[in-house]
Amino acid sequence: MTGRPRLAFYGDDLTGSTDVMEALATRGLPTVLFTRLPTAEEAARFGDRPAVGVAGTSRSESPAWMDAHLPDVFRWMRDTGAEICHYKICSTFDSSPTIGSIGRAIDIGAAVFDQPMVPVVVGAPQLKRYTAFGTLFAGFRGETFRIDRHPVMRRHPVTPMDEADLRLHLAGQTERSVGLVDPTRLQPAAADAPVDAIAATAGIVLFDVLDAVTQARVGHHLWRLRDRARLVVGSSGVEYALNHVWSDDPDALVVPATDTRPAARMAVVSGSCSPTTERQIRHALAHGFEGLPLDHALLAGPDAGAVVEAAIRAGEAILARGRSVVAYTALGAPDHARDSGSADPSAGHAVGRALGRILAALVRRAGLGRAMVAGGDTSSHALQELGLYALELAVPLPQSPGSPLCRAHSDDAAVDGLEIAFKGGQVGDDDYFSAILAAANTAETGR
């Protein structure tokens, strides 16, 4: 980068990375999200951005993969010179000692940054995620659940959350001690000294975030501790907390002035087995989209190439009729049950890449200007097939924070400027697909 960015981040999956980009860009910090570690030339093109990130896949990777790949990631963040460097994790904290280990990532990052203490911030009320006395809660369909009783996350097919106390959850992934800054230490008149005492003795300091008051105090601590704790681990709650320091009005939205019109049609691929995505697919099918069901096992198997080609031909035919297409691997309880038995990460990676090949072909052959991927892990691996090197915010969807419409940058003219959304499994209202199709933001739009 040609200047010193205020913040550099790495997202452990793609949808988490676009979540951070949205949290920053809609609060007045233009942000570029690279799809891999950028070349010097690519970085120079966006050298004036105050925030820069890289979208990764570590949420679905093994500790051995992390040992091989994350040191370079942390060195990249460190070498940007950013005032704060953020390793972005999912706000549901789903991880395990063998897949997406947050503890292992903290150990690697702390070594690269030579940092004895690493702050961790998970709560983000904007996303209906809350932490209180070390315990994580998450909203779902108008109710709030402890994460180990959450209807979806306690049954996640790869990393089910069976422990809501994040200190205990981390204890299975790292030997570092975990200290807690609870809400009693985060009131407006609370002194800094008790927090400093915790930070002086713990290898990890978990900061609770329960509401706007505690979030603002966490932002205060992250910013004042940055000289000795430059690396921070957490959800986009990190950015929402820092916005209280960086902005006079942290709730004011700044909409980028992009000329984005509603699309006549688009292509969607989904590898999510979330009931939230199921409802969204059913809504889309009832409102003008045509469905293309795909077999998860076949996409992960030896004959995947033929399945992909058949799906491309079927998708082209739908688009030729002027309709939008949604290709999906899971819909309804039978699909959920089937997919829950395929927790092998390599199978999920293969399915994500296969869906990416389908989407890339449909965009190029049909000349589409808009597309979408549903599923956090799916998005990370599908992205690799699209030939994109960077994303920027095009249109935020305030009703579905964390999964905005993005504008893509590519050296391939066929996909350069593509408008694309990446949606996590639990994100969005039932009409999310239709909202992305209709998303618009004229060039005259400002604050």
Image (cartoon, helix red, strand yellow):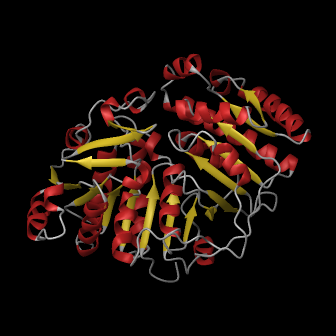
Using residue 71 as the reference point, say whether residue 263 is left or right of it: right
Q: Residue at x 44, y 81 (%)?
A: 4
Residue 251 falls in which quadrant of the image? bottom left
Count of picture labels: 0
Where residue 178 appears, x then y in whole percent? 17, 50
Question: Closest to the observer: 196 or 3?
Answer: 196
Where's the C terminus, which quadrant?
bottom right
Where residue 300 appears, x then y in whole percent? 63, 27
User: Up-down: is 85 above or below 357?
Assistant: below
User: Up-down: is 97 above or below 118?
Assistant: above
Q: Residue at x 57, y 34 (%)?
A: 272
Residue 76 seen anywhere in this rendered image of the structure: no
Where residue 299 appears, x then y in whole percent? 67, 27
Instruction: Work out which residue is located at the far front of the displayed protein and give it.
Output: 142
User: Up-down: is 434 above or below 259?
Assistant: above
Q: Residue at x 41, y 57 (%)?
A: 236
Using residue 274 as the reference point, say whether residue 96 is left or right of it: left
Question: Closest to the observer: 337 or 398?
Answer: 398
Using residue 248 as the reference point, say whether residue 358 is left or right of it: right
Q: Residue at x 73, y 32 (%)?
A: 285
